[in-house]
Every structure is written in structure tokens, then in C-alpha cells.
Image (spheres, helix red, strand yellow):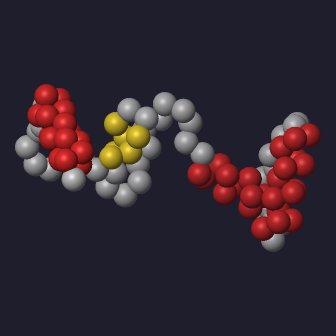
Amino acid sequence: MSRTDDVQFNVRSAFARTRAHELAKLTGMTATQVVEDALRGYVPPGAAMTAGRLVQRGPILVRPSEGKKISLIEAEAALSAVRERDLED
């Protein structure tokens, strides 16, 4: 006789239990599906995030550069030129 492997995970938090059941009712999912979905989407703080071709640089996601590198001085000069141009109009 084979035995089924029923996995069980107990969380001893009244808030987590209540919130999982509230979300289950709102979404039409089971509480287990809500928890699984939340865990799949969770990224711990400090862990590198990726989304398609984007990479994390500090707290934001950016496209990796493919061309020449621009120095901070060049970037500031370009921004300054655009700001001055907008004031002349």
C-alpha cells in the first residue's frame, strides 16, 4: 500500500492566517495558493532583483549599458544643457 506524501506547513500567526483567508476569498484562490503566490514573488531585501534584461544598480532596476561609458561630468553637462534649453523656450 503506497502512502501519499501530504506536505503540511504550519504558521503560528493570527495575522497571516486571517490575511491569507481574506485574500483567498477576494481572489477565489485557496489560502495555500495565496501563500505560494506570495512566496514566489517575495525578494528579500538586499537580494539582486532581475526583470527581463534589467539589472539592479543600487535601489533601482536599469537597462545594462551597451555603448560607451559616460562620466558623471559628461552626464551633468548634458543635463545642464537640457535644463538651460528648456528655460529659453
Q: Residue at x 83, y 43 (%)?
A: 16
**Horizontal side, residue 55 vs residue 16: left or right:** left
Could you tell me residue 85's position as x and y percent? Answer: 18, 47
**Figure quadrant of the N terminus:** bottom right
Could you tell me residue 62's position as x and y percent? Answer: 33, 46
Q: Which of 3 and 87 lies nearest the eye of the viewer?
A: 87
User: Is residue 5 shown to the viewer in this render?
Assistant: no
Q: Which of 80 and 32 lies nearest the eye of the viewer?
A: 80
**Horizontal side, residue 84 vs residue 24: left or right:** left
User: Is residue 27 shown to the viewer in this render?
Assistant: yes
Q: Which of 18 and 12 lies nearest the eye of the viewer?
A: 18
**Horizontal side, residue 74 vs residue 60: left or right:** left
Residue 22 image-quadrant placement: bottom right
Q: Residue at x 90, y 49 (%)?
A: 18
Q: Is residue 73 above or below residue 5?
A: above
Q: Residue at x 34, y 36 (%)?
A: 57
